Amino acid sequence: MKKIKVSHKGRICKHPACKIFLSIYNHECYCYLHQDKLIIQDSIRGAAHLAKV
């Protein structure tokens, strides 16, 4: 039987205004609400950088 990878209990989302406890199965530093926002912000910054080149 394959062992499932888990993260530490009691981790909190790194977003400054967020107090959500992360699941032991969520290996990211941000909760589901803020992870998507980070991806969108990164893609916008990348697109802005490419537009300047």
Image (cartoon, grey):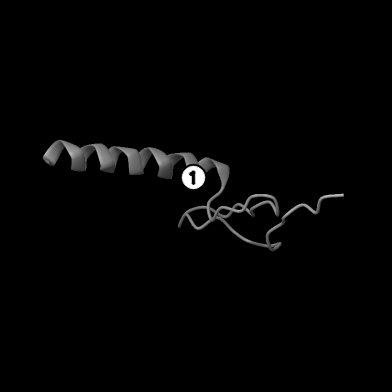
For mark 1, does the 10 Å Cα neighbourhood hold few (<14), some (14 to 19), or many (20 or more) residues?
A: some
Q: Position of residue 24 (x, y in %)?
A: 70, 54
Along the line of sight, which residue is nearer the eye, 52 or 41?
52
In the picture provided, is 1 more to the left or to the right than 16? right
> In the image, what residue type sits under mark 1?
His
Q: Position of residue 49 (x, y in %)?
A: 20, 43
Q: With respect to residue 41, does 23 lie above or below?
A: below
In the picture as drawn, the residue positioned furthest to the right comes out as 1
Q: Position of residue 19 (x, y in %)?
A: 57, 55
In the picture provided, is 35 more to the left or to the right than 53? right
In the picture provided, is 45 more to the left or to the right than 35? left
- The quarter of the rendered structure image containing the C terminus is top left
Name the secondary structure under disc 1.
helix
Along the line of sight, which residue is nearer the eye, 24 or 34?
24
In the picture as drawn, the residue positioned furthest to the front comes out as 1
Badge 1 is on which residue? 34
Q: Position of residue 26 (x, y in %)?
A: 64, 50
Residue plotted at (45% across, 57% down):
16
In the picture as drawn, the residue positioned furthest to the left comes out as 53
Number of marks = 1
Along the line of sight, which residue is nearer the eye, 3 or 13?
3
Residue plotted at (49% across, 45% down):
34
Q: With respect to residue 19, does 53 lie above or below?
A: above
Residue plotted at (72% across, 56% down):
6
- Quadrant housing residue 7: bottom right
